[in-house]
Image (cartoon, coloured by chain):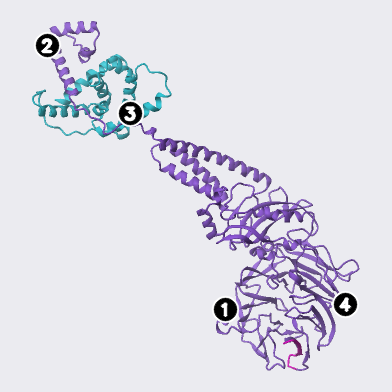
Amino acid sequence: MNYLYRLLGDSAVAEDLAQETFTRAWNAHRQLPALDNPRAWLYRIATNAARDHFRRARLIAWLPLLGHEPGLQLEGPEEQAVESERMRRALLQLSPNYRIPLVLYTCQGFTVAEIAGALSLSRAAVKQRLVRARQQLREAFE
Amino acid sequence: MTIHPDDLIATYRDLTPGERRKIDTHLAGCAECRARLAAYQRQDAALESIPKISPRGRLRPRQMSLPRRAFAGLGNALALGGLAALLWLFSLQVQAANQGLLTGNGTGTAGAVITEPGISIPPTSVRAPSPWLEALPWIAAALLLVGVLFILSRRSLLPTVAGAMLSALVLVSFVPPLSALPNPAALYWRVAGGYSYDPHLPFKNSFLIAGRPEEQLEPYLDKLIGEVGLSPLDPVQSLARYEILRVSLHPRKGRTALVTTRFIYADGSSRIYPVPLLGPAIDVWGFLLAGWRADGLQRLRSEHLALAGQPFAGPGSPILLGPARRLDLHPAANRLDEVNPGHWLWSSVRVQRLVWAPDGRAFLTAMESDSAARQLWLVPLDGSPPQPIGPPGDIRQYGWSPDGHTIVYTLLDADALAVDSGRPYAIMSASPGRRDKTFTLATALESDRLPGLTVEGAWFFSGDSLWLAPYNGNPAILLLPNLPARPMASSPRPAPDGLRLAYSCGSDLCVLDRDGGHPAQRESLEASEIAWSSDGSRLAVIDRDPNNLRPVRLAILSRDGKELLIREIAPGEATEAPQWTPDGSAVFVQTYPQDGRRIIAVDLASSQVLDLSQEHWDAYFALSPDGETLLLNNGRGDFWLADVLRP
């Protein structure tokens, strides 16, 4: 669910799509043979649910700028919370094609190979998207 | 130029040992890449610091809900059920069409498509089956649609609930035994009327008709197999078999069931008649009708026996009837009497009276749709549509002026009734050419009997005076005040020359000249009906005790009232007016002994009284103006002709 929350930035939608993910998984697992990597398969379903959501809602993230604050100066808890919120908003400005592999890699601990398997991409393509995702995120954050 | 391995820096956590050695070597000599790696690591830390969320409740897969799974199955069932119902109804339709079951009415060859177009007047025409039968395919299609919609949506219960309610309504309305429960469709038909069902299909609203009228009727229909007669039988071709097509409740008389039946005769021809069933034994406010106590065939089942003194005409009789033949009228005219299924049973004597036009090209008849709501009809013999004469009303008697230009009838006048209940009747006139234009010739009269019809106008009594009302509605003229004997609820019968008249005066018959001269009073002759011979030389008088304490007699009197002949013509009950042959050789009288309908002929040369009626006829008749043909009808549809034979 947190994966979806990071992708979508909306806890209610994330919860709903998590339920949708499990519903799809429940319907599908009875018709499938044993899975090699159930975790990747579940994330793939969640990713598809998120993509469906993007298509249905034609989600346009319109995010007010919080003001330009240089670098990461992690000091007290209050400053950390502000920085986290800025990062969450910056992440939402990325297109889904970059946001999804980045969240899988950094937040969910997926390897490049696992991401490639979940998203049906080549390893090189995953690496390429991660590079661009990081660049775009840095620009969005700064 | 230095190449910076961005892809390895971006995935520094997930490198192979070889890649790790390579990038570490590069990082040792490249400050820019070291800074980038540090930035990415801070980026990762920041991403991980985004707060986590927890579900508000336990996540439950939605499809695990039992009601939803059940409704999902119901959606499939609705779709499949609707599809199956459509296919089934289609196959039934094809089968029925092949058997000619759902085609029109009228005559034709059994099994063929039979059409008798243009029947619009009778409400019981089988051309209008229940709209619900035609709606069933649409209902099935609706079920299919709802099922498909539900399968596609799977998100809302609304289509399923609507589909379930629709299915329940269909089941409880059409499918026994569930349809025996109270249901809104039965209530609708109880109010709107006209419910019908096809006995070959399993659909039936059993709350409205609990029993099976067709099964009650079948034994009686079986008894008619091999018989001949008038409607619904055929006078020449015996009944070979029958097919029950439809069962309905009469559109207006909701306690009468109509079993629409195709009667198929020996030569393969067929006709369709709605056979009525009346008097349901089970009847709760018009619901649960069952156990019909009377049927339209029962008078055809009674044995046809000759009455004492009135033998059946046979070989050697001076008067005979030839075989009856069906009149080729307009289809609507053939079914005029369908407006009232009671015509199959009732012995009402005045309503169906047939009156030929003087030129023999049309006839008058009145059909009763409801109590005191009778419509007078002019029925041409050339096949053109029947024409209503005047508005419907409580019409009593009707006839033609001698020249055939005017139709005259009597009715109960509500306005006159309100003024004086003892004088409630009126005389009306209408022209066949302008049938919507009627004139009131006289009103506030004591008698509903047809006035005397002469070329000048209508003769009638008011008090003890004789009046003449012109047919064009001009004021009536006093012809004779202070009659020597007061007429008792009777009507004057003028001789064809208009110079003499006869009328009932109490229990006697009075005859006098138009100017009051030469009066004669024939005592003990209770003249219920009087008719002059065409030459005006004789009178035919029906002598009938109103209390039925003695047989009905026909008296033939001279112009001055002298008795020439008296014969018994019926054991009792009512009779119609005598009808003379033009040559004055015979008198025909319609009698109704014990609910029967008999055709009595009195041959004046031999003084013989003969019963010309035949088994399974049960017919009213009218003698044609030329005296050579009888027009027949028995209240069950169709009109017939039979030649009068004088061997």
Q: Residue A107 location, x and y as percent? A: 23, 21
Give me the chain letter of mark 4: B
Write down the residue under mark 1. B414
Labels 2 and 4 in the same subunit? yes
Looking at the image, tell me whether mark 4 or mark 1 is earlier in sequence order: 1
Secondary structure found at label 2: helix
Write down the residue under mark 4. B607
Write down the residue under mark 2. B31
Residue A7 vs residue B523, the one in the foreground? B523
Labels 3 and 1 in the same subunit? no
Looking at the image, tell me whether mark 2 or mark 1 is earlier in sequence order: 2
Labels 2 and 3 in the same subunit? no
Which chain does the cyan colour mark?
A
Labels 4 and 1 in the same subunit? yes
Secondary structure found at label 1: helix
Q: What's the amino acid at mark 2?
A: Ala
Q: Colour of chain B?
A: purple
Are discs 2 and 1 less than 8 Å apart at CB?
no
Indicate whether B549 appears above or below B197.
below
Q: What's the amino acid at mark 1?
A: Ala
Q: Is residue B53 left or right of residue A49?
A: left
Is residue B596 visible in this depiction of the protein? yes
Q: CA distance from mark 4 to mark 3?
A: 108 Å
Which mark is on residue A49?
3
Is residue B385 visible in this depiction of the protein? no
